Amino acid sequence: VDAFEWVPGAVGYHIASGECVSLKDPKSRAWCPMMLKDGIAGTLGPVGEPYIRAFPLPEIFFGLLTSGRYTLVETYFMSLPYLSWKMVLIGDPLYRPFLRRSAGPVSE
């Protein structure tokens, strides 16, 4: 479904089964490969049926990411209900799109 336009650096995901099963298939119409083709910087999805409870809760995932305190991989693992359960993260693990840099000197 070509339903979105992504700004450079966007991070997003779609909650549905098997969205990362066919990343290498050029004819795949699954959300993850289509989002990557459309230029999204980071996404996540299941490689099998994870059931709804296995997805990170969007309010936790995006709350942590937009805080600027955590990288994409830290955000992913802190919001993931189950470790090693059919979910994958795609993108630069050190990506931190909302990092706020202090204008003043660093105090010790």
Image (spheres, helix red, strand yellow):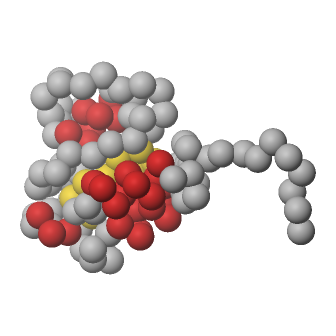
Q: Is residue 26 left or right of residue 74?
A: left
Name the image quarter holding residue 106. Answer: bottom right
* Residue located 40% across and 62% down the image: 76
Residue found 42% across the figure and 25% down from its top: 7
Quarter of the picture containing the N terminus is top left
Q: Nearer the viewer, residue 102 or 72?
A: 102
On screen, 85 above or below 10? below
Pick the front one: 61 or 37: 61
Q: Residue at x 89, y 68 (%)?
A: 108
Instruction: Name which quarter of the figure residue 46 lies in.
Output: bottom left
Residue nearer the viewer, 18 or 69: 69
Task: Please provide percent x and percent y for residue 89.
Answer: 37, 56
Q: Position of residue 62 (x, y in %)?
A: 38, 51
Q: Is residue 83 above or below residue 55?
A: below
Lateral position of residue 105 relative to residue 71, left or right: right
* Left or right of residue 28, residue 10 in this image: right
> In the displayed structure, does residue 55 sit left or right of residue 5?
left
- In percent of width and height, residue 11 lies at 39, 41
Is residue 17 visible in the rendered image? The answer is yes
Q: Position of residue 17 (x, y in %)?
A: 11, 55
User: Is 19 or 3 nearer to us in this picture?
Assistant: 3
Q: Residue at x 55, y 59 (%)?
A: 70
- Asked whether residue 23 is in view, the answer is no
